[in-house]
């Protein structure tokens, strides 16, 4: 079974996260995984170059996870070596008062990647059916409709040439505890520790339920969700790089035609 088949649920299927093991590592061969990952990264570098040159498609990568789930690490590792000019990373924090005066997709849409670009969302419009739902920041009648709004929005992007990949980095509650403890114990990680993450951890089960609904309701052919086993970073990186490479390859991109008669051009002294 490919990495992709293991973690991409069929659209329409009700998701139970308990069925997905955050510790899963395929055949468990870490050395092989590292080599494959490096190979994927080289291929990504080449594919990104054609994406940029061809200027026809865009790629949007959505990353969602619980705190310490590895969103930052994924961006750092998987995008290493990619031409920074071709990538835009947007981190979505608590909305500003101005953003709250608009519909919830207003602030998102303006960061959708342009043709030729890779856009990465570190958190996304899904927060509006996750933290917003769990903390009851809007009434249920409001967030219930958002799954449809999200599907319509992603459909618009897809119809406009944006290929969308959505990754849920799936860590266990125990793994989060260890990562929080690391942040407390290692001075150069203190800055990553936030007491504010603890009340969120307390509501773990409510978040899992919200994630299950978000993934179930918004797992479409044109914007698929992948549930990535993320307790082991080396496996997480391999899985995500595999999917990105396979997706970019499936676009069959080509360099644009050169100007005619390039062989006759002489560069003047
Ligand atoms: P890190 O802690 O690794 O720097 P982070 O993504 O957790 O990254 P924070 O500034 O700690 O960044 O947290 C951002 C917070 O903003 C999260 O708690 C997230 O749930 C919240 N947030 C994002 N979008 C929304 C939204 N639409 N409504 C309410 N809260 C949101
Ligand atoms: Mg945080």
Image (cartoon, helix red, strand yellow):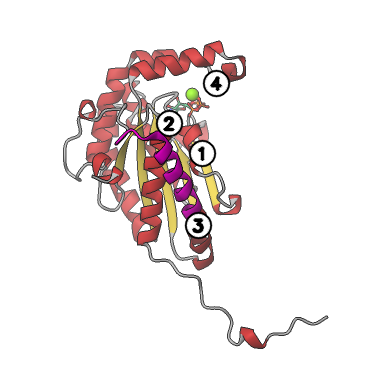
Give how far across and how far down residue 178 sits, in percent.
Answer: 43, 15
Say which residue label 4 marks: 192
Say which residue label 1 marks: 77
Report the span colored magenta: 27-44
For image coordinates 40% across by 13% down, the residue present is 199
* Residue 15 position (above or below residue 242): above
Say which residue label 3 marks: 48
Q: Distance from label 2 to label 4 (Cα)?
A: 18 Å
Q: Distance from label 2 to label 3 (Cα)?
A: 23 Å
Answer few, some or many: residues within 10 Å of disc 1's Cα (few below 14, many 20 plus, some between 14 and 19).
Answer: some
Say which residue label 2 marks: 233
Magenta-colored segment: predominant secondary structure = helix
Evaluate if marks 1 and 2 touch, with contact meaning CB atoms under 8 Å apart: yes
Q: Which of disc 1 and disc 4 is earlier in sequence?
A: 1
Q: Which of disc 3 and disc 2 is earlier in sequence?
A: 3
Answer few, some or many: residues within 10 Å of disc 2's Cα (few below 14, many 20 plus, some between 14 and 19).
Answer: some
Residue 195 visible in image: no
- The foreground one among 151 and 118 is 118
Q: Residue furthest left?
A: 13
Instruction: Give the number of the mark in front: 4 or 1.
Output: 1
Q: Which of disc 2 and disc 1 is earlier in sequence?
A: 1
Q: Which of disc 3 and disc 1 is earlier in sequence?
A: 3
Task: Label 2: state its secondary structure.
Answer: helix
Give how far across and how far down residue 1 sits, in percent.
Answer: 23, 44
């Amino acid at each position: 079974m490919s990495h992709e088949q293991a973690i991409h649920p069929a659209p329409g299927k009700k998701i139970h996260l308990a069925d997905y093991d955050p510790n899963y590592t395929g055949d468990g061969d870490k050395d092989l995984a590292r080599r494959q990952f490096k190979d994927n990264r080289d291929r990504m570098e080449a594919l990104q170059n054609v994406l940029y040159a061809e200027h026809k498609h865009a790629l949007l990568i959505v990353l969602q996870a619980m705190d310490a789930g590895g969103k930052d690490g994924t961006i750092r590792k998987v995008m290493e070596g990619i031409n920074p000019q071709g990538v835009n990373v947007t981190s979505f924090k608590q909305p500003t008062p101005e953003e709250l005066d608009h519909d919830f997709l207003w602030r998102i849409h303006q960061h959708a990647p342009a043709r030729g670009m890779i856009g990465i969302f570190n958190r996304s419009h899904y927060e509006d059916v996750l933290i917003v739902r769990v903390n009851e920041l809007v009434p249920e009648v409001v967030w219930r409709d958002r799954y449809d709004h999200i599907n319509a929005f992603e459909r618009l992007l897809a119809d406009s040439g944006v290929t969308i990949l959505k990754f849920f980095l799936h860590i266990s509650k125990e793994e989060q505890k260890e990562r929080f403890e690391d942040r407390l114990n290692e001075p150069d990680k203190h800055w990553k520790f936030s007491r504010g993450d603890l009340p969120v951890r307390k509501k773990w089960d409510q978040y899992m339920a919200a994630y299950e609904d978000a993934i179930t309701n918004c797992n479409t052919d044109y914007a698929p969700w992948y549930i990535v086993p993320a307790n082991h970073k080396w496996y997480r990186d391999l899985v995500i790089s595999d999917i990105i490479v396979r997706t970019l390859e499936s676009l069959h991109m080509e360099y644009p035609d050169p100007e005619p008669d390039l062989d006759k051009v002489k560069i003047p002294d």
